[in-house]
Image (cartoon, grey):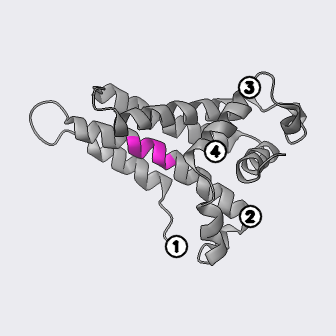
């Protein structure tokens, strides 16, 4: 399985907004850059989830793809909302380090939600007009989110992935 590399998606986003001709950057390029920035985060999260269950050395195993493809965008949004919640559901607090997530992971969740909303508008709202600065902000936001996730503790990253992969009852 060829996993989309999150860094390559961010590089692609940056290339899309590089000046190539006179005049303003095309809306299509700005929109695709915003979308690529979000998808860099989404595919990063999916690879983290599948690596945690199957293992990063077993990416060719058919089970890896099953885990990788088991999460959709609405699940990501819901878990990010739960992470950011000031008063999380009691069923979730048992999974959380110290019964709440750190500012780093909450920042990651906020940035993922923000980029997801921007990606949705960029991909589906023809009335929305985006500026070059919107794409630059999306790319820097994605990089900041990756840094926040990687700076968060191992236990809370594991809790985040558990919430993402397994339905709570």
Can you give x and y, in whole percent of width and height, for residue 167 in the image? 77, 50
Q: Give the secondary structure at mark 2.
A: helix
How far apart, in angstroms, are the residues tagged by discs 1 and 3?
35 Å
Q: Upstream in the sequence, badge 4 or badge 1?
A: 1
How far apart, in angstroms, are the residues tagged by discs 3 and 4?
15 Å
Q: For residue 119: magenta?
A: no
Badge 3, how many Cα within 10 Å: few under 14, some, many 20+?
Answer: few
**Which residue in the protein does label 4 denote?**
75
Q: Give the secondary structure at mark 4.
A: helix
How far apart, in angstroms, are the residues tagged by discs 4 and 1?
23 Å
How far apart, in angstroms, are the residues tagged by discs 2 and 3?
26 Å
Depth-wise, is mark 2 or mark 3 nearer the camera? 3
9 vs 137: above or below: below
Q: Is the magenta stretch mostly helix, strand or loop?
A: helix
How far apart, in angstroms, are the residues tagged by discs 4 and 2?
17 Å
**Which residue in the protein does label 1 denote?**
1
**Which residue in the protein does label 3 denote?**
85
Cβ–Cβ below 8 Å for labels 2 and 3?
no
Can you give x and y, in whole percent of width and height, for residue 40 in the image? 48, 48
Q: Give the secondary structure at mark 1.
A: loop
How far apart, in angstroms, are the residues tagged by discs 2 and 1?
16 Å
Can you give x and y, in whole percent of width and height, for residue 168 in the image? 81, 46
Q: Give the secondary structure at mark 3.
A: loop
Q: Give the range drawn in magenta.
A: 35-40
**Which residue in the protein does label 2 denote?**
53
Badge 1, how many Cα within 10 Å: few under 14, some, many 20+?
Answer: few
Q: Upstream in the sequence, badge 1 or badge 3?
A: 1
Q: Upstream in the sequence, badge 4 or badge 2?
A: 2
Q: Upstream in the sequence, badge 2 or badge 3?
A: 2
Depth-wise, is mark 3 or mark 4 nearer the camera? 4
């Amino acid at each position: 399985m060829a996993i989309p590399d999150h860094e390559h998606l961010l590089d692609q986003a940056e290339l899309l907004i590089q000046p190539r001709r006179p005049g303003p950057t095309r809306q299509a390029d700005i929109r695709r850059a915003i979308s690529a920035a979000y998808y860099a985060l989404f595919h990063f999260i999916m690879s983290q989830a599948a690596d945690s269950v199957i293992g990063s050395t077993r990416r060719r195993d058919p089970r890896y793809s099953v885990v990788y493809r088991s999460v959709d965008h609405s699940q990501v949004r819901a878990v990010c909302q739960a992470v950011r919640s000031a008063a999380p559901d009691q069923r979730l607090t048992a999974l959380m380090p110290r019964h709440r997530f750190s500012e780093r992971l909450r920042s990651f969740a906020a940035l993922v939600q923000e980029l997801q909303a921007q990606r949705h508008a960029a991909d589906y709202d023809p009335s929305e007009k985006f500026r070059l600065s919107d794409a630059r902000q999306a790319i820097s936001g994605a990089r900041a989110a990756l840094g926040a996730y990687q700076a968060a503790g191992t236990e809370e990253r594991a809790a985040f992935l558990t919430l993402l992969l397994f339905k709570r009852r």
